[in-house]
Amino acid sequence: MAQLGVRMNRFHIVGHKNHGKTSLIVQLVHLLAQRGLRVGTVKHTHHRHELDVPGKDSYRHRKAGAVVSGIVSRDCSAIFLPHRTLEETGGDGKYNRLELLYGDCDLVLVEGDLKTTVPKIEVWRAALGSEPLARDDLTIDAIVSDDPLALSHIAVFPRSDLGPLVAWLLDRLNGTTAANAAPVAAGSDDSTWRPDTVRLWPGGGGRGGGARCAPGEIP
């Protein structure tokens, strides 16, 4: 489906520490791969990490000034791209450098990084005591949670049934919307999400008037 050189179709999975970002990505990769999609992943971190092993050949190549260095083995390859400019480290610049490497992926799931312009999905658990990031960050497009949540401006999907979220991702990937779904019944309370319902917002931006689908129902 994807072609080498096209821009990465990125979706970022964000949330507070220990709210389940990694587990959600692992499950989404499995479900999307079952549908025949080629899925790439990226782990974002704010910390400074030396990803190579100091003293090893590839490390010495990079420290000597190589603009890119790599390791090729029988089972796996790795490439190290030093970030040398602000454009390469801030915003979406660091992902732009990876586009060719992910060119054969239908979509790429990034764990973390709120400072991006592409769709962001928050995973949230009430038991951990933190308020949802989406309460104040209006750039987040959707929340995944099994806990009651009073947010009317955003799409909310159940954590225990990822079918609706997968359908939403595929809609966004294919440029389609849920505009033809049945409207919410007049007089219904749409301000509080319950685990047996999910809101899907049409228009590709995650906001606006919407429709309600049962868990597992493909819009």
Image (tube, rainbow, N blue to C red):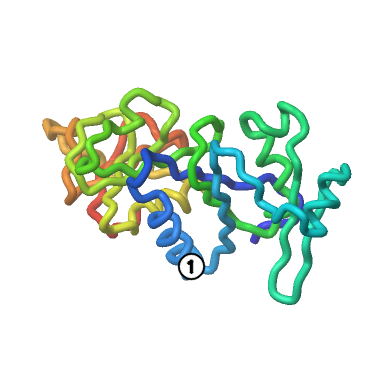
**Left or right for 121, reference 8:** left
Q: What residue does disc 1 label?
A: 35
Residue 153 position, x and y percent, is 31, 28
Residue 160 located left or right of residue 173? left
Estimate how packed mark 1 is, as few (under 14), some (14 to 19) or many (20 or more) residues with alpha carbons within 10 Å: few
Image x and y of residue 116, in percent: 55, 32
Depth check: give the residue in front, 104 or 203.
104
Kind of residue at badge 1? Arg
Which percent across, then down, holds residue 60?
Answer: 83, 52
Which quadrant: the N terminus?
Answer: bottom right
Residue 139 versus residue 167 in the image, above or below? above
Q: Is residue 179 left or right of residue 103?
A: left
Q: Please give left or right for residue 22 compared with residue 37 in the image.
A: left
User: Residue at position x 68%, y 59% from top?
Assistant: 104
Mark yes or no: residue 174 visible: no
Q: Nearer the viewer, residue 9 or 44?
A: 44
Q: Is residue 59 above or below residue 122?
A: below
Q: Quadrant of residue 124?
A: top left
Closer-to-camera residue (169/138)? 138
Rendered location of residue 65, percent (x, y): 87, 42
| Residue 45 at least partly seen | yes
Q: Residue furthest front?
A: 55
Residue drawn at (43%, 41%) of the image: 14
Q: What residue occupies the far top of the structure in this picture?
A: 136
